[in-house]
Image (cartoon, rainbow, N blue to C red):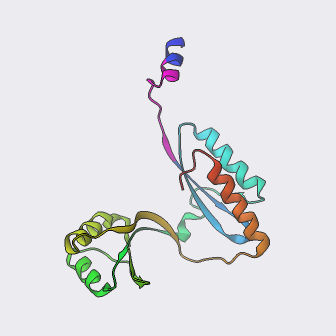
Amino acid sequence: VIEKALDKASGAGGEDFAVARYEGFGPGGCMLIVDCLTDNPNRTIGDVRACFTKTKCKLGAPGSVGHLFDHCAILVFAGDDDEAVLEALVEADVDVTDIESEDGLISVFTPVSDYYKARQALLDTFEGLAFEVDEMQFLPQTTTTLEAEDLAQYERLLDMLNYLDDVQN
């Protein structure tokens, strides 16, 4: 026991980290998904639940909110020819969910399963392409407008969650 404690204190003992995802209902009927990376799931759920409780929000059961979000790959880069981008992605057999062109930036949304194919097709087609955004995220299917009081409570909840070490997104 003493040797294990010394190994852990010196950093030699390997720690097991696990991914945890919590879903909940915030102020004004908004919904949140909280992604965590933790070495102690019991501590993390307690901390996340405390954030929700202190802001008069409710932590939901797994799956209670997730079905209202789409998990997508998002690629954003400078450009204005969204037709050429769509053509390059179709030739690479990428399932494109949506393409938006706004303010000199093109945003490509694809299913997570096609992330690598879409990224590689764009890099192969457009030389020197630099991505402004290159990530996978949950995008809401609907949005909720919050009143001033609910917005203050929502920002407080986000601040409390961001303060937790285990919360990643």
Q: Residue at x 21, y 72 (%)?
A: 127
Residue 108 lies in what quarter of the image?
A: bottom left
- Compared to residue 102, the image places residue 158 above or below, namely above
Q: Is 103 placed left or right of 114 in the picture?
A: right
In which quadrant will I find the N terminus?
A: top right
- Compared to residue 90, the image places residue 157 above or below, namely above
Q: Position of residue 136 (x, y in %)?
A: 42, 63
Q: Position of residue 83 (x, y in %)?
A: 29, 87
Viewer-proximal residue among 72 and 158: 158
Find out whether residue 86 is within the magenta segment: no
Q: Is 53 placed left or right of 9 in the picture?
A: right
Viewer-proximal residue among 20 and 89: 89
Residue 156 lies in what quarter of the image?
A: bottom right
* Label tally: 0
Q: Residue at x 27, y 74 (%)?
A: 94
Residue 74 lies in what quarter of the image?
A: bottom left
Q: Residue at x 28, y 81 (%)?
A: 85
Q: Position of residue 143 (x, y in %)?
A: 61, 77
Q: Is 153 placed left or right of 165 in the picture?
A: right
Q: Which residues are magenta?
A: 7-19
As drawn, the residue found furthest toward the top would be 2
Q: Position of residue 152 (x, y in %)?
A: 75, 66
Q: Residue at x 71, y 52 (%)?
A: 51
Viewer-proximal residue among 140 and 74: 74
In which quadrant will I find the C terminus?
A: bottom right
Viewer-proximal residue among 120 and 112: 120
